[in-house]
Structure formats: C-alpha cells, structure tokens
Image: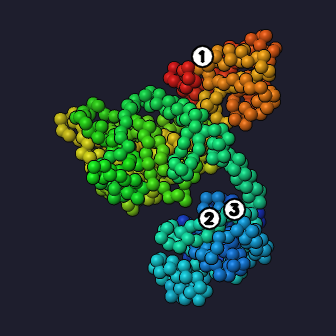
Amino acid sequence: MQIQVNGQSVEVQAGAPCGEALKQGLSKKQFKNTVVCRCGDALLDLSTPLPETCTTIEPVFADSEDGLEIIRHSTAHLMAEAVKKLFPEAKVTIGPSVENGFYYDFDFERPFTPEDLEKIEEEMNRSAGADKPFSRREMSAAEAKAFFEAQGESYKGEIIDDLGADVYSIYEHGSFTDLCRGPHVPRTGLLNAFKLLSVAGAYWRGDEKNKQLQRIYGTAWASPKQLKQYLDRLEEAKKRDHRKLGTQLDLFSIHEDVGGGMILWHPKGALVRAILEDFEKKEHLKRGYQFVQGPLILKRELWEKSGHYDNYRENMYFTEIDEQAYGIKPMNCLSHMLIYKSRIRSYRDLPIRYFEHGVVHRHEKSGVLHGLLRVRSFTQDDAHLLCRPDQLQDEIIGVATFVKDVMGLFGFEFEAEISTRPEKSIGSDEDWERATEALKNALEAMGWDYDINEGDGAFYGPKIDIIIKDALERRWQCATIQCDFTLPDRFDLVYVGDDGARHRPVMLHRVILGSIERFLGVLIEHYAGAFPVWLAPVQARVLTVTDAQNEFAEKVRSVLAQKGIRVEADTRNEKLGYKVREAQVEKIPYMLVVGDKEKEAGAVNVRWRDGDDPGMLSLEEAADLILAAAREPFERGGMSYSFSTSGTPIPA
C-alpha cells in the first residue's frame, strides 16, 4: 500500500507497523527523534499496524508538544513500575501527564519520604537503561477486571466499572502492566531526562470523603539539556517565591490566628497596592467607566435568583442577621445589576460601564491555599458593562485592548482562550451560542489567535481568558471577559429602545488584573521582588557616610519628596557598606550616597540597585533621572503620564 510520509510516497505492506513506514520516509536523525505517529487526529504507537483507511502519516517528534506529553505519560508508567518493585504492597490508581511533568497516585500505608524518592528514581534509571519495550494488547472488560483484581489492584476495577467500555487497552513494559489508552514511546531507553520532585496527599477522585492517596510528582523532557534548563528555572522560582520575598521586603504576612487565606498588608505592601489601584482607577476613568460600590453581604434570595446559590454555593460563606440568611459576596455582579436597575435606562445611555475594586470572599480548601496566589479574601478589579447587542463586539474589543495595554506595561506576553459552556450552567442554548460567537468574532476582528477550552466557562456564560507568561515562562490566568445574556434576563434588566419598546441589554463581566492579591504575587515573582521604579514602595534611599551629613540628608529627602519621589533617609550610625547592602536586599531602585564631598557640592552620589553607578549628580539631575525611569514604561507603551506628589502615576 502507498503511504504519504513527510511529503513523499512510500510503499509498505498492508498491516505493516506505522514505524516501518515512517522509517522509510524520514532521515535516521528524524526517525530516532520520533516517539509515535499521527494518522489524522489519532496518535498511534509505532508498533500499531497501519489502518487501511490511513493514507498519510506524520511523525510526532520527542520535543513537540504531543511528543512531550507522551514522554511524560510513559515516564509515569516507568515510575509506577519502580514503586511496585520497591513497595509491592502499594496500589496503583491513576498517572497522567500534566504541564511540565507527570504524577501518579498510590494507595500506600505511609507517606513516601525524600529517601524513598531517591530509591524510586534510581530504579527508574535502571529500567530505562534496560531499554524495555512498551507493548499494547486488548482485553474485554471482564478479562481486564479479573486480571487487575488478581493483582490486588482494586482501583483499576473501579475505573473499569465507571468507564463502562467493552474493550480496554493494556500496556506492559518489564514487570509492570497498566490500564491505559496510550500511546507510549517504543522503549524505556527513550526516557532519559526525568526527575522526581515532590510528594503530596491527594484524595481518590478529588473527593475528601474518599481515602487519601500519596501523589508523587515528577518532570520529564525530551533531552537532559531541556531537563537541566527546567530544573534551573525551578531553582530560580524558589529564589523568587513571593512568600519568601514578601517577608524579606516587609510587604505582607499571613497569620493562622487570623485565618488561612487572609492577608495582612504591611505599610510597604499596602502602598504598592495603593499605587496599582490608583493607576487602575485613572485608567478606567479615561476609558469611560463609572465607579460604584456594593455591600459585602446580600440576602440569600438574591443569590438564589442569580443562580449562584444552586451553582456556586460550595464556594460561598453564609451568615444570618435577624433570622434572615445572607451570602457574603464571592462576586460583585449582583450589586452592579441592581444599580443599573435603580432607574429607567434609554438606548442612548448605553453602554454603561461600572467599575469597583470589590472585596470578595470565596471558600477554598485549606490544602490549596498558597500565599497570595490562592486566598479566601481578595479584591477584584471588577467591572460590568451593560450594552445593546449591536454594541457588544466593540465593548469586547475595548476590554481586550485595555488588557493588552496593561499587560504590556508589565512586560507580559499573553495568549487567549475561549472557555465554553460547563455541565453545571444556566441559560438557553441559544443565548450560550450567541455569547460564544460574540467572543470569537471580537477576537477574530482584532486578529488574535485563540484556543478553545471546552466546558470551562462560568455557569452563566462563556468567557475569554487571557493567559500571561512571566519571566520564567510560567503561565498565569488573570484577565477574563465573560459574556452574559442570562443574568440580565433573570434580573429583568431593560432599556428603552429608539422604538419606544423595552429591550434586554447584554452584560460583560470582566477583570483586568483579576485578584489584586494574586496579581501582586505573580508580579513579585516576575520581578524577583525588584519592582519597576514607578511601582516600588521606596524609589530612593539617601545614605549618609557619617552623622555629619544627617541634616543635608534630610534636606535631600525633602527636596525629592516635593517632586513626587517616594524617598527615605537612612541616617543610622552604621557603616556605609552595611547600609548599601541592606538597601540592595530590600531591592530599592536608587541609593543616594551623601558624604562631605556631596554635602559641599549640594549633590548626591547615585547608585542603581543592579550595581550601575551614574555617579555624582545635582539634586535636580537625580530627581529627573528617577522620574524619567518611573515614566519610561508608560511612554514605551504609548501612555501619557505625569506624577503626583505621592509618586503615583496620573493622566497627563
């Protein structure tokens, strides 16, 4: 039979393995780097006989996205084999690939220790060195269940019952056999770049009512070089951990006496928040938003009407006042809709854009709380836009442009994905289709590429999620644009059209930064704590050489502060080197050293935190240097800003 491989036609026998056809159509180097083959949308093991309907096959290389996923899943099997050999009483559950790695969950009588991980990794290396083949066979449901029950693998039988298929694929390598749809790499010898990372507890099927399992995490890559690069990024991430830097920079703290997921903001951290929020407020005013504010709690009946009580109740907190149940708000949309409904709206009034830095509370399990990145109480830069259907595309484009401008200010690259209707949702199919098409059309009009994230929309509407990439190439979801035809209908929101009749507006829910807490956690790690000059809580610190310069240092501080620079004076009786090192640890952008020479000249000796030394400058020159550095990101992004006396950016 004739098969197209890599743009050329090759002749193979009917039923020959996919790998044989690829071997004829690829160079030796290309074939060596191939892990599976692709026929249409299907990925097949290299040993799989060519389907009769397949006329074209493509190689899937080890370093491709699909190739890495296969390597990681295969490495998960390699790890499970090692665990079963070292700890035969451990029961195997599931072991998928995940971003940058894999995990496997085991039912074991005790937590695995770091020493256990070392032994498991050594055994994995031995198995990889033995270059054992992966082989696939099929079993009926009854055969597969009997097979795994005979091995004492009770979880596999439960999986088989739940899937309800007639036939199951089984993969084997060495002494290990697992229920798996595959495909896998041809041999264990191709798995030569992996590392076990950590152990965590995980409930079977994510349900805390079930037994807690032991989850071993690992990472795997196409080459040792890629593995080293990733491990180096992990080490850098540890240095940038926002929890560690939050203490070092005296930004925030978390106290169990207060409660998990509740943040205490220290003066410097609160100032960074204030600068960020003030910037956002001014940007919203420039873009036609109006400020509003709603209460922290609302009657339960409102949450029932909106659908939150039925679809989001497990994430909410409730309280009671005068025998009336209230819900502590997890979102701000209800108050904004009631403000809209407070009077009759004309088509000429639309669009209306309401904005609030709204404090919300959401119930998160204690096991997922993580510094600023996963909290229970946080502030959203939340807005709700109500518009006519004919205005919808322009409003979506306006929000997406807003996101692009702000993310550019911080130097983030980003990508977009559209999340569609989840199983647990409200509203008609027609409204969901209209909303999804509106989001797609807006992104296409902007020329943005996007992926589809099936079933991950909000319960009331589909959404655009903006995924940013930080300095370590980690991905974070922050901004979102949700299109909602359903809640305006539930709350009977209307406007009077030019025909004198009442019409239903469309509502966009959107955030730019998302959670202020989470975004600051991302920023701290993105910048390694060294905030850009405009956002730094202290932009400059005056350092004296001896007590003889104390009075002049205070004068310098006062002059710069009057120009809108956030500046401190360190006049302690300490050595200059100690003061410089302390300022560097605190990541203060500018150190202004004053000794007798500077005092006499009425100048300062400027040092930048990265070691660059502009040298002696007049107070005017030093102020201009600092303010220019603060303005630079805005000017680069095409934003026109000047600075207030507090050092906060404001529209020029």
Query: Where does label 3 land, which residue?
Result: 197
| Real-space CA distance between mark 1 and mark 2, rounded to the nearest whole angstrom | 53 Å
Q: Residue at left 56%, top 32%?
A: 271
The answer to the question of whether label 2 and label 3 lie on touching residues, with beta carbons closer than 8 A, is no
* Residue labelled with disc 1: 562
Residue situated in front as seen by the camera: 301 or 35: 301
The amino acid type found where label 1 is placed reads: Gln
Quadrant the N terminus occupies: bottom right
What is the basis of the colouring in this image?
rainbow
Q: Which class describes the residues within 10 Å of circle 1: few (<14), some (14-19), or many (20+)?
A: few
In the image, residue 593 above or below residue 483: above
Q: Position of residue 233 (x, y in %)?
A: 71, 51
Could you tell me how far apart the alpha carbons at marks 2 and 3 are, in whole angstroms? 10 Å
- Which quadrant of the view contains residue 645? top right
* Circle nearer the N terminus (1, 2): 2
Q: Earlier in the sequence, mark 1 or mark 3?
A: 3
- Secondary structure at badge 1 equals helix
Q: Tell me where residue 166 appears, x and y as whole percent.
A: 48, 83
Residues at marks 1 and 3, CA–CA distance in whole angstroms? 51 Å
Residue 532 in the image: state x and y as whole percent: 64, 32
Task: Say which of 208 and 618 sits in front.
Answer: 208
**Mark 3: amino acid:** Leu
Q: Which quarter of the picture shows residue 569?
A: top right
Asked whether 221 or 242 is in front, the reply is 242
Query: Vertical placement of 121 versus 340: above or below?
Result: below
> Is residue 386 at all visible to an observer of this figure?
yes
User: Disc 3 on helix, strand or loop?
Assistant: strand
* Circle 2 residue: 200
Q: Nearer the viewer, mark 1 or mark 3?
A: 1
